Image (spheres, helix red, strand yellow):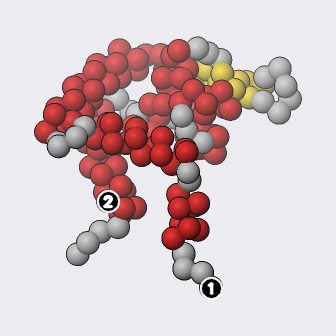
């Protein structure tokens, strides 16, 4: 059966995230792969507002909000009032900082494994993904769908 693009992307993400989650578990790290963009944004500079985290991490603000909520629940980050009453400032907790050496070792292994995968493919997956993101930023998939619909 010919799988659609969305199905293939979800399966690819399951394969990648599943393996990375297993690597974290093997290292006894209570950590989800989805936390990584937020964690890296906070490592670079903290505290940050959720909007700043989203921008630096390259994820949507709703995704950043949801991920930060999970990370607060897991004790990895804390939230405090910001200078603007509507903003919350997010920072790493001591527990979040304690994970960093193990996480950084896992991230190095993940980067090496991604390089190995890229080398095996006809063109590097990382480049295909970057090119796809650039193309969709130039012209959204919603616009492409609208153009693909037959006139009524």
Look at the picture and state if 27 lies above or below 98: below
Q: Nearer the viewer, residue 117 or 44?
A: 117
Of the two numbered discs 1 and 2 on the same chain, state the one appearing first in sequence.
2
Residue furthest to the right in view is 85
Residue at (22% x, 40% y) in the render:
123
Residue 54, percent across and down? 60, 33
Q: Nearer the viewer, residue 104 or 115?
A: 115
On the rendered structure, is 71 left or right of 119?
A: right
Quarter of the image where one finds residue 20: top left
Asked whether the viewer can see residue 116, the reply is yes
Look at the picture and state if 56 lies above or below 7: above
Residue at (40% x, 33% y) in the render:
31
Quarter of the image where one finds residue 34: top left
Quadrant showing the C terminus: bottom right
Residue 53, percent across and down? 61, 28
- Pointer 1: what residue? 152
Residue furthest to the left in view is 120
Residue at (40% x, 38% y) in the render:
130
- Pointer 2: what residue? 8
Q: CA distance from mark 1 to mark 2?
A: 30 Å
Look at the picture and state if 82 lies above or below 34: above
């Amino acid at each position: 059966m010919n799988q659609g693009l969305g199905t293939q992307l979800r399966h690819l993400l399951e394969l990648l995230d599943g393996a990375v989650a297993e690597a974290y578990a093997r290292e006894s790290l209570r950590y989800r792969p989805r936390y990584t963009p937020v964690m890296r944004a906070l490592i670079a500079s903290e505290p940050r507002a959720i909007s700043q985290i989203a921008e630096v991490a390259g994820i949507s603000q709703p995704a950043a909000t949801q991920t930060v909520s999970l990370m607060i629940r897991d004790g990895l980050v804390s939230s405090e009032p910001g200078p603007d009453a509507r903003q919350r400032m997010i920072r790493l907790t001591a527990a979040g900082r304690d994970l960093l050496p193990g996480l950084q070792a896992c991230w190095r292994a993940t980067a090496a494994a991604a390089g190995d995968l890229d080398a095996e493919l006809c063109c590097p997956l990382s480049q295909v993904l970057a090119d796809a993101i650039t193309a969709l930023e130039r012209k959204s998939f919603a616009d492409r769908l609208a153009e693909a619909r037959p006139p009524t």
